[in-house]
């Protein structure tokens, strides 16, 4: 048995720990995230886990861009300018308000991971499936952050779809921004929210109708 096979076989012994992590994971509002963020080795582990997702065709249709330290301030200033320029027709007072909100959004968490979906339309695997793999990478990143004692939040909004933001961070015309995952230490435990009624969203198909 290889080391990898042994690890896989041993996983059920730790199943309850993993299930408890999944049951208790909760997004932390970006304004409630602060220092410290993960150190280099912890971040490397998080990203390794993020990339361990279903990947039809082994295409690796995602990549990561990291924002930390002073780069967050520089990104904040430039993203604010882009928002104001792209929303020039908006009411001036409203535009000023949201420009400030957009800018500050990159300054709370000590680390922001931009998860990029780099789906290939020429691949034999549908683009939709490649994009889903990038979404799975976002989810794994959230779970890894939670397991390692950090708070995290997967956000999209205007920045995820802005051509200017895409250009700023070096995305190609074929790439999409699957999410901006904000990671840091939660200033306080987030309140629980209403969860889905599993019975209401689950059906059993029998084929007898």
Image (spheres, rainbow, N blue to C red):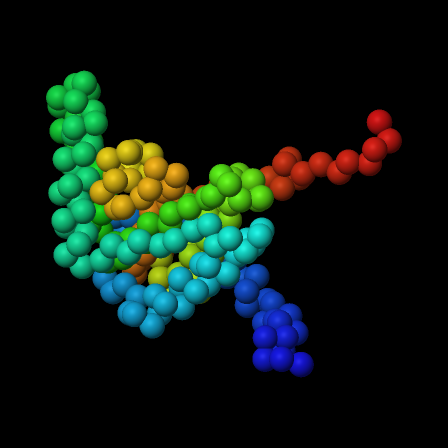
Identify whether 200 is placed above or below 87. Answer: below
Residue at x 33%, y 42% (from the top left corner): 172
Of 203 and 173, nearer the camera is 173
Identify whether 199 is placed above or below 20. Answer: above
For the image, the number of numbered tags is 0
Q: Left or right of 18: which side holds 145?
A: left
Of 140 and 53, nearer the camera is 53
Residue at x 40%, y 64% (from the top left corner): 46
Residue at x 22%, y 38% (from the top left corner): 102
The quarter of the picture where the C terminus appears is top right
Counting from the top left corner in percent of width and height, residue 103 is at: 18, 41
Counting from the top left corner in percent of width and height, residue 64 is at: 35, 54
Q: Which residue of the protein is positioned furthest toward the front in this rendering?
A: 122
Counting from the top left corner in percent of width and height, residue 92 is at: 13, 21
Q: Is residue 205 visible?
A: yes
Counting from the top left corner in percent of width and height, residue 114 is at: 33, 50
Q: Left or right of 72: which side holds 192?
A: right
The quarter of the picture where the N terminus appears is bottom right
> In which quadrant of the rendered view does residue 76 lie?
top left
Q: Is residue 25 visible?
A: no
> In which quadrant of the rendered view does residue 161 lie?
top left
Residue at x 62%, y 72% (from the top left corner): 8
């Amino acid at each position: 048995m290889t080391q990898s096979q042994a690890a896989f076989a041993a996983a059920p012994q730790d199943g309850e720990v993993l299930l408890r992590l999944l049951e208790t994971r909760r997004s932390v509002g970006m304004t409630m995230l602060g220092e410290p963020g993960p150190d280099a080795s912890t971040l490397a582990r998080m990203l390794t886990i993020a990339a361990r997702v279903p990947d039809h065709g082994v295409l690796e249709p995602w990549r990561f861009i990291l924002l930390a330290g002073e780069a967050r301030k520089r990104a904040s200033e430039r993203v604010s300018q882009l928002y104001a320029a792209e929303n020039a027709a908006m009411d001036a007072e409203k535009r000023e308000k949201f420009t400030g909100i957009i800018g500050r959004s990159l300054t709370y968490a000590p680390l922001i991971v931009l998860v990029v979906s780099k789906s290939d339309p020429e691949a034999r695997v549908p683009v939709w499936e490649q994009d889903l793999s990038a979404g799975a990478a976002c989810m794994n990143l959230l779970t890894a952050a939670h397991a390692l004692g950090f708070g995290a939040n997967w956000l999209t909004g205007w920045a995820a779809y802005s051509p200017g933001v895409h250009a700023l961070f070096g995305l190609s015309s074929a790439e999409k921004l699957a999410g901006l995952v904000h990671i840091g230490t939660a200033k306080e435990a987030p309140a629980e929210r209403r969860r889905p009624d599993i019975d209401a969203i689950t059906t059993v198909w029998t084929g007898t109708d």
